[in-house]
Image: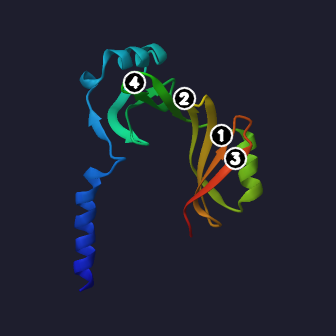
Amino acid sequence: MMPFFKNFAIILFLFACPFSSNSQEFISEDEITINILKWYYDQYPNGETISWSSSSVNNVDVLKVKFNYNENEYTATYSLKGKRLSETVKIENIPITVTNYLYDNYAKFKIKSFLKRIDFKANETSYEVEIKSKEAGLERIVFDTNFQRETNQVLTSN
């Protein structure tokens, strides 16, 4: 009887995924308006586009572009009217303040990612490190621009 429920759950999941409000649809650059392309190429000359996608964030339709620029991996989010809403960059060199915080607060940890996030609408910049530790499992820690811890969010626990 259990395999039936497991299979039913998998089928339900597969049917529900395309209708999720946070799903994204990959699109070609030909489908992007000239306003957004002009803004993108002005802000990131020589950026190497990886992909464009459309999705909904907080019930607002947006366009996202993933690209490489200056040897870093970026994601930029635009409104459909062409306004740049946010930018995320994956950073390889982690500031010593963040590293010290992690060594002071975790016995053992592995850094999964370190990102810089800029919210242009709120005019805020933050840094986000995702770590895996024995104490908390997978955890996201957000730092302000002075690398002072703002929040912790446990994503999965041990």
Displayed quadrant of residue 96: top right
Q: Which residue is mark 4?
A: 48
Q: Position of residue 65 (x, y in %)?
A: 39, 30
The CA distance from mark 2 to mark 4 is 25 Å
Q: Secondary structure at mark 4?
A: strand
Query: For this view, does 93 lie left or right of residue 41?
Result: right
Q: Which sits earlier in the primary sequence, circle 2 or circle 4?
A: 4
Image point (34%, 32%), residue name: 51
Closer mark to the observer between disc 3 and disc 1: 3
Q: Earlier in the sequence, mark 3 or mark 4?
A: 4
156 up-or-down from 98: above or below: below
| Residue placed under numbered mark 1 in the picture | 94
What residue sits right under mark 3 in the picture?
A: 150
Amino acid at dot 2: Lys
Q: Secondary structure at mark 3?
A: strand
Is label 3 or label 4 in front? 3
Residue neighbourhood size for the residue with mark 3, other residues' Cα within 10 Å, grouped as few (<14), some (14–19), many (≥20): few
Return the residue at label 2: 121
Instruction: Determine whether label 2 and label 3 are within 8 Å by CB.
Output: no
Residue lying at 56% horizontally and 67% vertically, measured from the top left: 157
> Nearer the viewer's eye, disc 1 or disc 2?
2
Q: Residue at x 50, y 31 (%)?
A: 86
